[in-house]
Amino acid sequence: MIHLPQIESPGVKVWGRLTSAVVSVLTLIGTHPKHERRGAGTMLIRWGFAQADKNQERCYVDSSNVGYALYKRCGFLEDVGKMSVDLDQYGPQGLGVQTWVAMLREPQVKTSD
Ligand SMILES: CC(C)(COP(=O)(O)OP(=O)(O)OC[C@H]1O[C@@H](n2cnc3c(N)ncnc32)[C@H](O)[C@@H]1OP(=O)(O)O)[C@@H](O)C(=O)NCCC(=O)NCCS
């Protein structure tokens, strides 16, 4: 998780909506394929949410297809954009068209007991 006072992600510039917002950006996370589905991804995302909540900042992520359901379940409730790129134009062949969804999560306010 990196904190940016002003988003500079090309995706966000394209989508235009958040260019002057203060947000936390969740960058790429990954779990070794041998260890997937054991909760590591969820832990990383929740750690990022805790940092963002401390600062009362929204969280933003460019989600891969594989990550989408996990991000949604963890709390990235709002889809704010979609970008598809034909990666075969830029490198080794065979990756084809990949799609990323831009997702947002509002900061949670903790209520005291
Ligand atoms: C997305 C990723 C980080 C999840 O890590 P993880 O440690 O398995 O995460 P968790 O155990 O907390 O969550 C499991 C959920 O992740 C998703 N997931 C994990 N492995 C998956 C796989 N091989 N195929 C499809 N979905 C998968 C599913 O939604 C899964 O929930 P389910 O078991 O109920 O279907 C991991 O699959 C990964 O590194 N993928 C490749 C890189 C990537 O796409 N990263 C996200 C980019 S923004």
Image (cartoon, helix red, strand yellow):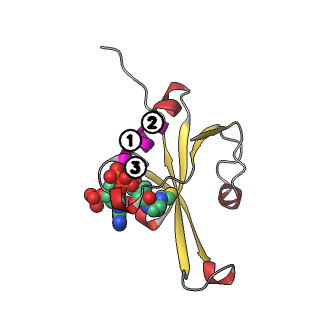
Q: Which span is picked out in magenta?
A: 40-49
Left or right: residue 71 versus residue 100 is left
Picture residue at 41% right of the left edge, 65% below the top: 66
Instruction: Name the one closer to the observer, 82 or 91.
Output: 91
Q: Is residue 44 magenta?
A: yes
Cα gap from disc 2 to disc 1, whole angstroms = 6 Å
Q: Is the residue under label 1 in contact with that under label 2 (CB below 8 Å)?
A: yes
Tell me the amino acid under the disc marked 3. Answer: Gly
- The image shows residue 105, relative to residue 109, as above or below, that is below
Residue position for label 2: 47
Mark 3 close to ligand 1, CB under 8 Å = yes
Instruction: Name the one closer to the observer, 38 or 20.
Output: 38
Picture residue at 51% right of the left edge, 31% below the top: 51
Q: Is residue 104 visible?
A: yes
Q: Circle 1 — which element?
A: helix
Picture residue at 44% right of the left edge, 43% below the top: 44
Could you tell me residue 75's position as x and y percent? Answer: 39, 45
| Residue at the extreme top of the image, as rendered | 113
